[in-house]
Structures are given as C-alpha cells and as structure tokens.
Image (spheres, rainbow, N blue to C red):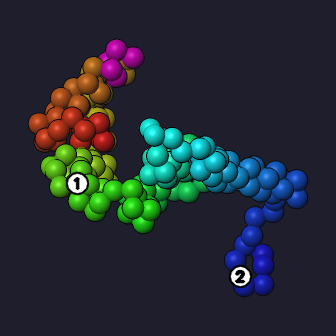
C-alpha cells in the first residue's frame, strides 16, 4: 500500500526493464523506418509528395502493427496528418465519411453493442443452443440459428460481422 491509499502492484525489477526496452525498441522502429523513407532520393515517379505520403502511411501501419499507440488514435491522426503535411485536400481526406457505408457500419456496431450490453444476443444464443442440444453439432446449429434470428434486424453484412 502506498502513502496515497492506492495499492501498487509488486513487480520484479527485471520484468519492468525488459518491458521498457521492448517498448522503446517498438517506438524506435515506428519512428526510424518512416524517417528512412525520407532518405530515399526523389525521382520522377517517387516525388517528394509521394515520399511524405509513404512516410506518414508507414508510420500509421507500423503504429497499428507494433501497438505503440491505440488503434483508434492512429486512425484519427492519419487523416489529420494527411492535411497537416498537405498530402491531400480536406474534401479528399474526409470524402469516405460522406458515403453511407461508414455510418451503416458504425450503426451496426452500436446495435451490436446494445445487443451485447443488454444481454439479448447472449439470451438468443443460449436459447437456440438449449433447443438444439448440448452436443457439438447442436451448438453449431444453435449458433447458426441465433445468427439467422438476429440477421433481419441488422441491415448490412458489416454490421452482422460486428455482432
């Protein structure tokens, strides 16, 4: 117990050092590899604008792969970096959000979260598993039946996958 009343976990010194070294190596990779892209000489096809685009995109992909930052934060920062580095205009960067697809996916994910949060999806799944029997085949048929029952309420395949 610490002095402020909050308990602190007891961690061995070696474990903390290994974790910090590993995190620093991930950050090093995440920052150095995109920087190396700037060292590639510009040509007719590999213009300075394309170098900036590749560096920013490589940073985002490496951030996702190495988990140096939360995925949502990287996804929000990527279009902003495209604007800051003048890679594309605002109407180009945010044009995918003007279509219906992202909003249907977001709606499906919200609906899926509501079904899971209220327990309705679990109740439907358990009910169908109970009715089909407690065997492997019965479980598979029950889960398939639960998906069929829930499918009419979800408008798109992306929303169905979210559940």
Question: Image point 23% across, 31% down: which residue?
Answer: 147
Label 1 belongs to which residue?
A: 95
Name the side, left or right, on which 81 lies relative to 149: right
Question: Image point 61% across, 43% down: which residue?
Answer: 40
In-front residue for pair 97/58: 58
Depth check, mark 2 against mark 1: the one in front is: 1
For marks 2 and 1, the one nearer the N-term is: 2
Residue 96, horizontal then vertical, whole percent:
24, 50
Q: Is residue 2 above or below residue 153?
A: below
Q: Which residues are magenta?
A: 136-140
In-front residue for pair 48/153: 48
- Work out which quarter of the rendered image holds the N terminus and state it: bottom right
On residue 5, which mark appears? 2
- Does the image show residue 43? yes
Which secondary structure, mark 2?
A: loop
Residue 137, horizontal then vertical, whole percent:
34, 14
């Amino acid at each position: 117990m610490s002095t402020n009343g909050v308990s602190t976990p007891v961690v061995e010194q070696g474990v903390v050092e290994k974790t910090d070294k590993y995190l620093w190596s991930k950050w090093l990779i995440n920052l150095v590899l995109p920087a190396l892209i700037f060292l590639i000489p510009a040509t007719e096809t590999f213009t300075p604008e394309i170098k900036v685009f590749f560096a920013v995109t490589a940073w985002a992909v490496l951030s996702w792969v190495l988990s140096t930052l939360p995925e949502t934060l990287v996804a929000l920062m990527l279009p902003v970096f495209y604007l800051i580095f003048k890679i594309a205009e605002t109407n180009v960067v945010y044009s995918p959000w003007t279509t219906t697809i992202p909003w249907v996916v977001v709606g499906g994910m919200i609906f899926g979260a509501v079904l899971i949060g209220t327990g309705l999806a679990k109740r439907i799944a358990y009910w169908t598993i109970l009715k089909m029997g407690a065997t492997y085949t019965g479980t598979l048929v029950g889960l398939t039946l639960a998906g069929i029952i829930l499918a009419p309420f979800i408008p798109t395949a992306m929303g169905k996958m979210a559940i």
